[in-house]
Amino acid sequence: EDQVTQSPEALRLQEGESSSLNCSYTVSGLRGLFWYRQDPGKGPEFLFTLYSAGEEKEKERLKATLTKKESFLHITAPKPEDSATYLCAVQARETSGSRLTFGEGTQLTVNP
Amino acid sequence: DARVTQTPRHKVTEMGQEVTMRCQPILGHNTVFWYRQTMMQGLELLAYFRNRAPLDDSGMPKDRFSAEMPDATLATLKIQPSEPRDSAVYFCASGLVLGGRNQPQHFGDGTRLSIL
């Protein structure tokens, strides 16, 4: 069974204080790992897809990296508007169709 | 930007009533997903469709839940009869599957359902 574990559950940062969120996964052959951002009262918003170990993607203050067992979402010099819940999900190669298995998320708060 | 549209955004009803949630996927997407999100369970996949055909509904309580795609622009999730434990936020997502690398799923803003 595919499993995704995110840590920490919650993270409080001061504006400008860089940090990383972790996503550990167990999957029978990874087709893709996805990062989403979710704001209160909204649906998850797509950020990145990573397909193979060693791959990195960047967008503004966010950088996602991937190894064979985990992914990190690095946040550099965060701003209050980066406050949200960040979700990680995996898609298995053997999965029929394109179902995703989500982690529980990391709730990030950035204080000004 | 193209978006997934869900209606209603909020629904409060009494136990035993029928609830129907609707979703308009992004035009051109061939796969539609229904998820449920609660504090306890996080995001759970209920069912999904490819080219309007159901592919997997194993996450759905079949005795009370049903999902359909009457046409390519409309997906529905129905609960009958509803129970208090069905209270959650229900999300619809759509995506494009093209063989090898699947495109990411794009989510609507959900239907917040409260069953009294």
Image (spheres, rainbow, N blue to C red):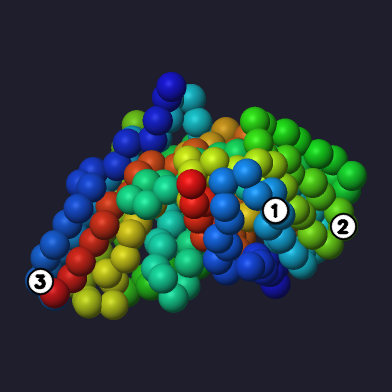
Q: Amino acid at mark 3?
A: Glu
Q: Position of residue A59 (x, y in %)?
A: 66, 32
Residue beneath label 2, please? A68
Eye-nearest disc, 2 or 1:
1
Query: Which residue is at 68% across, 57% downward?
Result: A21
**Do badges 2 and 3 share one subunit?**
no
Q: Nearer the viewer, residue A82 or A53?
A: A82
Res. B50 visible in picture: no
**Do badges 3 and 1 share one subunit?**
no
Q: Position of residue B41 (x, y in %)?
A: 47, 72
Q: Position of residue A86 (x, y in %)?
A: 56, 53
The disc label shown at residue B14, or none:
3
Q: Amino acid at mark 2?
A: Lys
Please indicate whether residue B73 sits to the left or right of residue A92 in the image: left
Residue beneath label 1, please? A19
Eye-nearest disc, 2 or 3:
2
Query: Which residue is at 38% across, 42% downward?
Result: B108
Q: Amino acid at mark 1?
A: Ser
Of marks 2 and 1, which one's residue comes earlier in the chain?
1
